Amino acid sequence: MNSSIFGADKVDRGQRPLPSAAYRRRVGSRRRLTMETLEPRQLLATITTYPTTAGSGQAEVTVASGLIWFTELSANTIGSIDPAHPEAGVTSRTLGNAGPPVTITTGPDNAVWYTAFGKGTMSRLDPANPAAAIQSYALPGKNYTPANSAAAFPFSATPSDLTAGPGGLIWYTDPANNAIGNLDPAHPANTSALAVTRPAGMLGIKNLTSHIVSSAGKLWFTEASFANGAVASSGVGIYDPTANTWNEVVLPNSAGLQPFDITTVGQSIWVSLANITTNASGTVVNSAKVARIDPTNNNAVSVFTLPTPPAPANASLPYPYRIAAGPDGNLWFSDVQNGEIGTFNVTSHATTYLTLPAAGASPNGLVASAVDGAVWYADATGSVGRIIQGTQLTITPPNQPPATLNAGTPFGLTVYATNAAGTLDPSFNGNVTIALANNPGGSTLGGTKTVNAVNGVATFSGLTLDKASNGYTLTVSTSGLTSATTTGVNVSSAVQGATHLVVQSVSPTSMNPGTPFSVIVRAENASGAVDTTYTGSVTIALASNPGNSTLGGTLTVNAAGGVATFNGLTLNNAGNGYTLGVTASGLAGATTSGINVAPPAQHATHLVIAAQPPSSALTGSPFSVVVQALTDGGAIDPSFSGSVTISLANGASGLGGQTTIQAVNGVATFNNLTLANVGSGYALVVTSPGLAGTNSAAITVQAPTPPSPVIVAASIVMNPPKKKRGKATFGGFQIQFNSAMDGASFGNGNNYSLRAMVQVTQKVGKKRVKVLQPAKPVAFSIQVVDSTTVKLVTTNQKVFKLGGQLTLSGISAAGGIKSAAGGYLGGVTGSVLTFSISKNAKSITRIS
């Protein structure tokens, strides 16, 4: 959106007067939230928000001198917060004539550099002394001729994004002049710019809020070409300042997808894209994607679709307004449509969403901070936020090693990856290593000392300590997580005889009738250590039998090394609370904890539509439908993985997208479905072999509202001289539109009004004053130059001695001017556009 070049999309959020002091501090509020994802996993994060002036329009974020800095466009300030002491709140620096700020970055001099709305400048704020005077430097603009073009720039500089880049320079994009430029922080008066027109045929950045990033000595910036007011193709331009070469990557199937931001994750370049339209209800996201460019593989491109967040219930497709590399090595993005922050896993391609605590949150820029390992974001509704994903290794008491054991006796322990609150993180599958922390006896730790965690759990078994002593402790560690240390272990050298049995484990403890399970029993001495010399027989039997089952399997086994293992045991009837007793001659027996046996699972009998299609849709606009396979009891059948087909009821045609998919865990999700034909009462039918199908709710399909035509130029027409040394003569006025126009309304003179200014006398109080009014009609004729251009032909230039006024009517009810596609001038129902004609018809300017 062009308006975001100037931050206009972030301004209209309500403003309040600036306080008298240049600095303000506020204290943050804290809320622990759950990060939901479309994967079958759950991540936890802590979000803390720190308020700023309400409606101050927080936009872009950077890190400089260990602080988080962000622009506040509406308040004309730049704010900062210390991530090491965020409880101190936000400090804001009033900019005065050096603002208001739009884009921001950290320069190679570690200063904060930003651009100001409508100023064509780049300014420097010293983070070590933010109260010091701000220096602003003009950027190349109108009449500047770049080194790689013979044509001078037609407009003042309008920088839309900044980045520190090659040569120790700060680079920026200038969409108004279709150029990129730079400023030398060491000599800030030294600026230059280059036109994005070499080589010929590049998409360019004109009419686009182009963003830029530096990677591997090159500049990468978003591009787009437009046709009839819509994106025809999107891409990424590449400039190598060392070799002075240009290149670009055109993104595949990018028609209608506008690039919004660009960043680096590792060696890859990432771009966020979305198809955005507006209607009477507001912004509509029709498609949202991220694209990866791999410079190590000949700039190969991969494009990924971002799914709809699972919450809230009315969530739409995300609007990936800004993106950044996160501390976890993944891609993070701000979703201004749903008020969420998302993460895209660059390896698994799974998307996770985090709902922000502020009501109506509108996250904009975001950045990862090395100071606290957090992601910071700017919320345009009046706050900055910090997101911390904290995980650690934990050993809970039931999973600690034995308090006492004999030298050489195998033992084990279980380690969990949790967040700060102790909740399991099942996404962690890294290596975990165990080592001696306190080694009073000089033991060697035996066994496998590095294992892979599975769904957040790492299990060590067969560990040994070979020397007797008291107070051994062990430490478990892994990269990036806080380590954990066991409780103390006392090791005895003498082997004491077994006195009793202990049930080490029952696996599983919940099952269906006939499912095999195992029981492991230890023969321990009075000190609680395993008697590794014990090899006697151990018998297992039912102790409590709530379901009148028969215990199947081998019920008597010989212990080995003091451990008896029963495999392949079964219970043949359902029931809750079965217990088993284990006995051995001369030893005290033991009883298992409860075992639950559930009836066999029911299977799916019918389909239901869990997420209905929209009741109203536009032709060609994608939507989703979620189908569940349910049992007669109304539960999802997770074992169902059959094919599910969706179609239009009554044999209707026009349904697009993938209409047959395989269910996963009983759920079939149809994404990117479309309807091609306008009409009402459409219904979708979902079917699957062997299951009862169902119909969706009714859908009304409408055609998209065509965009309104835009006047791109209005000018005075001068006829060439009739004689060799004659003068050019006045010929009227010419209006040019951005798209092909409807011939009938375009060439209808009733849709135009041309009047000359006349001087009239009006009574104001007791005085009579002379004023100008467009009261005198001027005759003209309509000449259609081509499909986009019309002339109002009149040769009477003198009639405009005092000036005049030209109006164009796009009122739909009166057959106003409209495009060939049907969009009326000035809006959905059209409006009247007015131009002021200067004295003697020297120029024409739009005034409404």
Image (tube, rainbow, N blue to C red):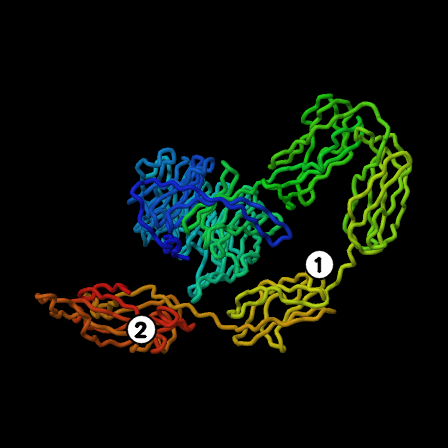
Residue 808's x, y, as percent? Answer: 30, 71
Q: Badge 1: how crowded within 10 Å, few (<14), some, or many (20+)?
A: some
> Does dot 1 land on a helix, a strand or a loop?
loop
Pick the residue in front: 256 or 197: 256
Q: Residues within 10 Å of mark 2 (few under 14, many from 20)?
A: many
Q: Is residue 108 left or right of residue 655?
A: left
**Helix, strand or loop for disc 2:** strand
Where, quadrant-wise, is the C terminus in this rendering?
Answer: bottom left
User: Horizontally, is 95 left or right of 795 in the view?
Assistant: right
Give residue 313's position: percent from left, percent from top.
55, 60
Whole-number angstrom distance, CA of label 1 to CA of label 2: 61 Å
Instruction: Determine which of the numbered discs, if any, sits on residue 638 in the image.
Output: 1
Q: Determine which quarter of the picture holds residue 406.
A: top right
Name which residue type carries label 1: Pro
- Which is nearer the eye, 212 or 287? 287
Q: Disc 2 residue type?
A: Ser
The residue where tag 2 is placed is 809
| Residue 726 is at least partly visible in this image | no
